[in-house]
């Protein structure tokens, strides 16, 4: 085989290898595009007020400046990236007020994850502060494993890590606490 024929067959071989590589790269990119799903909200709202009712009675009012609805993903949720102000009503129309800098509501579980400067105030003067708090909507129950501070005008100030309680502050279960609790009042 002459030198020119060797060069020509080398060029053909290199061209073939490059064509295969670029062809695979192109196919690989197409496969990547088809398997990637875009993670974007299916709905979006600004400056909203939601009223939750049950049997004609208002149970809660949620106010937020931004809501992102991800109801089309496998585990649907609603995100409130700019926080929420929520007012809960009991059967006697007593109110509990909740504020947080961020919130996510998970639809399949009815759990709301409240984060960032979470504050809860009851009409009876109880005030709880923490950085993260979960709210079980079905059972009307709050819980956290994070540090909390609970101020009760009748029982004093309690702080610690981990607490769970009903939305009216009538039942409170502490985990690791410190403070003075006056049970006589």
Image: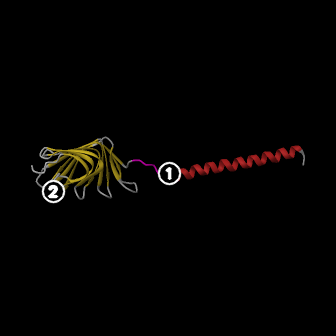
Which quadrant of the figure has residue 147? top left
In the rendered image, residue 121, in percent from the top left (x then y), is placed at 18, 44
Kind of element beneath mark 2 = loop
Counting other residues with Cα less than 10 Å from the Cα at mark 1, is it few (<14), some (14-19), or many (20 or more)? few
**Pointer 2 residue:** 56
Which quadrant of the figure has residue 80? top left
Q: Which residue lies at the image location 18% right of the left edge and 55% below the top edge?
A: 171
**Pointer 1 residue:** 36
In the rendered image, residue 88, in percent from the top left (x then y), is placed at 19, 50
Q: Which residue lies at the image location 17% right of the left edge and 51% below the top edge?
A: 169
Which portion, as a residue range, is magenta?
35-40
- For the stretch drawn in magenta, the main secondary structure is loop
Query: In this view of the protein, which residue sits in the foreground, 61 or 158?
Result: 158
Q: In this orientation, does residue 144 appear?
A: yes
Q: Is residue 172 located in the magenta-colored stretch of the structure?
A: no
Left or right: 57 as drawn, with respect to 108 = left
């Amino acid at each position: 085989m002459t030198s020119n024929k060797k060069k020509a067959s080398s060029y053909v071989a290199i061209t073939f290898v490059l064509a295969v590589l670029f062809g695979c790269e192109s196919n690989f990119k197409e496969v990547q595009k088809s398997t990637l799903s875009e993670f974007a909200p299916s709905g979006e709202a600004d400056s909203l007020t939601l009223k939750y009712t049950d049997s004609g009675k208002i149970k809660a009012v949620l106010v937020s400046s931004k809501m992102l609805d991800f109801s089309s993903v496998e585990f649907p949720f609603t995100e409130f990236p700019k926080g929420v102000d929520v007012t809960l009503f009991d059967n006697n129309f007593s109110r509990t007020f909740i504020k947080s800098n961020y919130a996510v509501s998970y639809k399949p579980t009815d759990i709301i994850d409240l984060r960032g400067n979470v504050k809860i105030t009851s009409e009876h003067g109880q005030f709880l502060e923490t950085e993260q708090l979960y709210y079980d909507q079905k059972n009307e129950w709050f819980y956290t494993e994070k540090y909390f501070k609970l101020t009760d005008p009748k029982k004093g100030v309690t702080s610690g890590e981990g607490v769970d309680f009903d939305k009216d502050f009538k039942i409170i279960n502490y985990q690791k606490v410190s403070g003075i609790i006056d049970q006589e009042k």
